[in-house]
Amino acid sequence: MTAILGIDLGGTKIAAGLVDESGAVSGRRSVATPARDGAAAVLAAIVELAREVIGSVPDTPVGCGIGAAGVIDPVTGDVLSATGSLPGWSGTALRTELSALLDLPVLAMNDVQAHSLGEAVRGAGAGHSSVLTVAAGTGIGGALVVDGSLLRGRHGAAGHYGHIVSADAVGRPCPCGGTGHVESVASGPALRNLYLESGGDAADAREVFALAATGDQRAQAAIDRAATALGVLIGGLVNEIDPDLVVLAGGLADSGDSWTSCVTAAARREMLPLLRGCPIVPARLGSDSALVGAALAFERARPLPKGTPQ
Ligand SMILES: [Zn+2]
């Protein structure tokens, strides 16, 4: 059996497991990301976790696929840019360094893209030809997979759907440095900001959802506005792409039916009449999706001798 080490590196957590050809995961482990300690500490934590996984399962991996925060160069596997959640991460030669540390061939890609590939091929999109995944949480992103092939883009930056202008976000500052992008009204932090602007008080989006469940009308209004903005975005993307289905993922997608139904209704209003039947479904692989997707990307890129461009 061919086993591949799958790794999911996020700003708060690193997860790893051994993935077989069917996408089944064994030996999964996770650890907090030492994000503030710099890139060398993050790499050391990945290697320690990887060795724990490898030591806990009978199969030896033939290689490693890692889905990592940041924009990852599709050719070199270097981190081209990263957000403030991983200080010093930008510029890391991720593929080269991890390959040397693990003594394994490595394929490195963006974590959202890895997540989307896993869902499209092994999860909610399995059996479909064109799958658009939209993930909404701390940020808004996603990816397009067509016939099992992920669109990564020239710089590995495809799928930054949160940075498309939204009529509902005019003048709002976006974490990317721009203004008026949909992420600035539809992400988890943006949803909380909407609630604060209406006079409410909550520590995070999760608390806004809890308040809405108790009947807080301002909390519900903030959720509706954020969800509607995301739905309008998704409807527009469907009009552009005409996918077989849309997979909704990310922390907000787990927040409850009211958010999901509001996103879906807004998306359908925006879609061209011919496309309104496009299914919008929840993600299915949970926290395994990115490591399954990264392992799958490695499998597809083989043969990949150590030290050659990916
Ligand atoms: Zn932006």
Image (spheres, grey):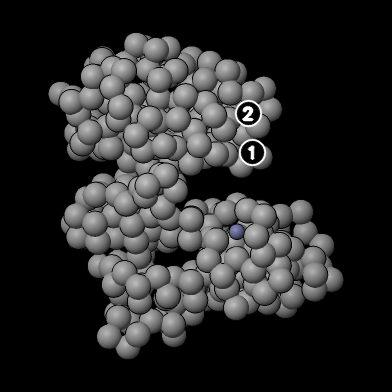
Which is more toward the observer, 63 or 219? 63
**Residue annotated with mark 1:** 85
Which secondary structure, mark 1? Answer: loop
Judge left or right: residue 123 versus residue 138: left
* Residue 106, horizontal then vertical, whole percent: 33, 24
Query: Can you tell me which quadrant of the image ligand 1 is in?
Result: bottom right
* Residue 281, horizontal then vertical, whole percent: 36, 65
Q: Is residue 160 above or below residue 222?
A: above
Q: Which dot, 2 or 1, sits closer to the camera?
A: 2
Q: Is residue 62 above or below residue 247?
A: above
* Residue 214, horizontal then vertical, whole percent: 70, 69
Indicate the amino acid at tag 1: Ser
Q: Residue at x 74, y 75 (%)?
A: 218
Is the shortest distance between ligand 1 and the CB of mark 1 under 8 Å?
Answer: no
The answer to whether any part of residue 290 appears in the image is: no
Indicate the amino acid at tag 2: Gly
